[in-house]
Amino acid sequence: TVAFKECGWTTSGAAPFDAAFYKERETEPPSTFTLQDLGNSLKRQFDPGVLTRVMLHVADILGKNIVVMNGMRNPGELVPLQELLPGKHILLGVRADFEVRKKRFLENRRRVGDPTTEEDFLRLDRRDQGEGEAPDGQQVARCLALIKPGNMIDNSGSFEALQVKVGTWYDEIASRYGLLMRE
């Protein structure tokens, strides 16, 4: 499925790319716990907005004027957007009910090292939400609290339903701000 083609973002081919990337390097992909640790380490070493600044720099190099940033984990990641693009960024939140997230994660996620038990999922989810984390660590709950009500999408249904909801939201934003329309 191609989504937001004008942004240069596509979901087609993502899994094969990941598998090929790691196979070529004769290594295993990192677990979600490892990725959380890496993100926290980068934010501590530099500052919470480091990943956003890198993304904006890459977008600039590639000449992209519409950028979709997925997976904000700390409110500090918003600071570079506020500083570099004041009034030119929009936050969209996508949220699913806890039981739906748990079911999807335990039944559908296949990243090496990801939780396979409910207890491990709970530990990962609590950390992701910010429980026991430093202020510059994982803070998804705080990030979602920043989303304006009209920009929060429920992802408790099917993937197809989510695509429709995000597409409808984008069409409204594109129309309002004169952005490229989807194909």
Image (cartoon, rainbow, N blue to C red):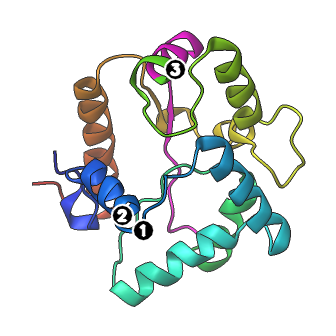
Q: What separation in Å lies between label 1 and label 3 (alpha carbons)? A: 31 Å
- Counting from the top left corner in percent of width and height, residue 3 is at 22, 50
| Quadrant in which the C terminus is drawn | bottom left
Residue at left offset 52%, top offset 20%: 101
The numbered mark, 3 or 2, whose residue comes first in the sequence reads 2
The numbered mark, 1 or 3, whose residue comes first in the sequence reads 1
Q: Nearer the viewer, mark 1 or mark 2?
A: 1
Question: In which image quadrant can residue 164 be found?
Answer: top left
Disc sitting over residue 21 in the figure: 2
The residue labelled by disc 1 is: 25
Identify which residue, 10 or 164, lies in the foreground. 10
Identify which residue, 113 or 8, lies in the foreground. 113
| Residue at far front of view | 26
| Quadrant in which the N terminus is drawn | top left
Answer whether labels 1 and 3 touch (C-beta < 8 Å). Answer: no
Question: In which image quadrant can residue 25 be found?
Answer: bottom left
- Counting from the top left corner in percent of width and height, residue 21 is at 36, 64
